[in-house]
Image (cartoon, rainbow, N blue to C red):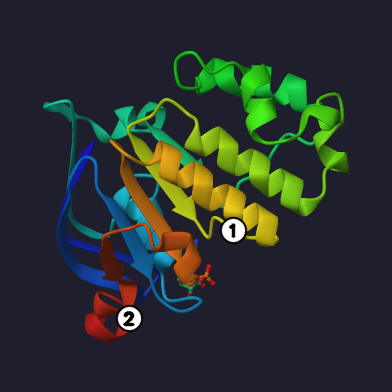
Amino acid sequence: MRIEANGLGKRFQRDWIFRGLTHVFEPGTATAILGPNGSGKSTLLNTISGQLLSSEGTLAYSHAGRAVAVEDVPPLLAYCAPYLELIEELTLTELLHFHTRFKPLRPSLSPQALIGLMYLEKSRHKLIRDFSSGMKQRLKLALALYADTPLLLLDEPTTNLDRTGMDWYREHVHATAPGRLVLVSSNVPEEYDFCPQQLSVTDFGAQAAR
Ligand SMILES: Nc1ncnc2c1ncn2[C@@H]1O[C@H](COP(=O)(O)OP(=O)(O)OP(=O)(O)O)[C@@H](O)[C@H]1O
């Protein structure tokens, strides 16, 4: 997946969150989107991926050499973010079967095998609502990391994870990032130190916009 942003800007009402972002996100690259709390990282991630309408500028998407319309981007992206919810009324097995009907896993990876990768075998029949916050985060991450999509968006990926969870994230992001376009919004170096490129949202942020 390739994304080309030209003069991109986003404002809410009269407040510009970022402005003047011109950048090409090349296929197979990983970029960290950095900046302090409230600086606009999530807004930037959502705008670049076409989930929020930009206020100015243009975005062009392509995949495997073909142009992709913004409305065709959602099936190509996998997204993990603290504000995305899981369906709490389902068991882990039910959720995986439901979710993967819309967002298939990598070929040859079954829901059963994914449960093993998450070390959640004992919880396969447990309701999601009864998962700990760390278990939910590991599940959200696994669904995104192992989705068969060329675009991977990770917003604060180690939220609620302990040391073991952090190590798990690092192992599995290394296994699944190569070959995809990866964007990581973060303040935590351990979440994004695998990204060769960094963009600071404050370079295009409110200050630059004034
Ligand atoms: N839908 C919205 N309407 C109005 N303002 C919004 C909306 N969404 C975000 N904002 C504002 O945009 C600014 C940037 O928010 P954003 O969540 O993108 O920052 P962030 O860098 O991801 O923050 P954090 O690190 O705390 O998650 C904040 O001032 C926020 O209040």
Quadrant that contains the N terminus: top left
Q: Residue at x 72, y 45 (%)?
A: 136
- Circle 2 SS class: helix
Using the image, tell me which numbered label, if any, was put on residue 144: none
Locate residue 151 relative to residue 139 in the image: left or right: left
- Using the rendered image of the protein, determine whether residue 73 is visible from the camera's viewpoint: yes
Q: Quadrant of residue 5?
A: bottom left
The image quadrant that residue 181 belongs to is top left
Mark 2 or mark 1, whichever is nearer to me: 1
Residue 25, image x and y in percent? 20, 50
Q: What residue type is labelled 1?
A: Thr
User: Badge 1 local density, few (<14 within 10 Å), some, or many (20+)?
Assistant: many
| Local crowd size for mark 2, using a 10 Å CA cut-off: few (<14), some (14–19), many (≥20) | some
Q: Name the residue under label 1.
A: 158
Q: Mark 2 points at which residue?
A: 206
The residue lying at 40 percent from left, 52 percent from top is 46
Q: Is residue 160 visible?
A: no
Residue 129: horizontal and vertical position, in percent?
84, 40
Q: Which residue is drawn at 50% across and 23% down?
A: 103
- Residue 153: x and y in percent read 42, 47
Out of 135 and 102, give the one closest to the viewer: 135
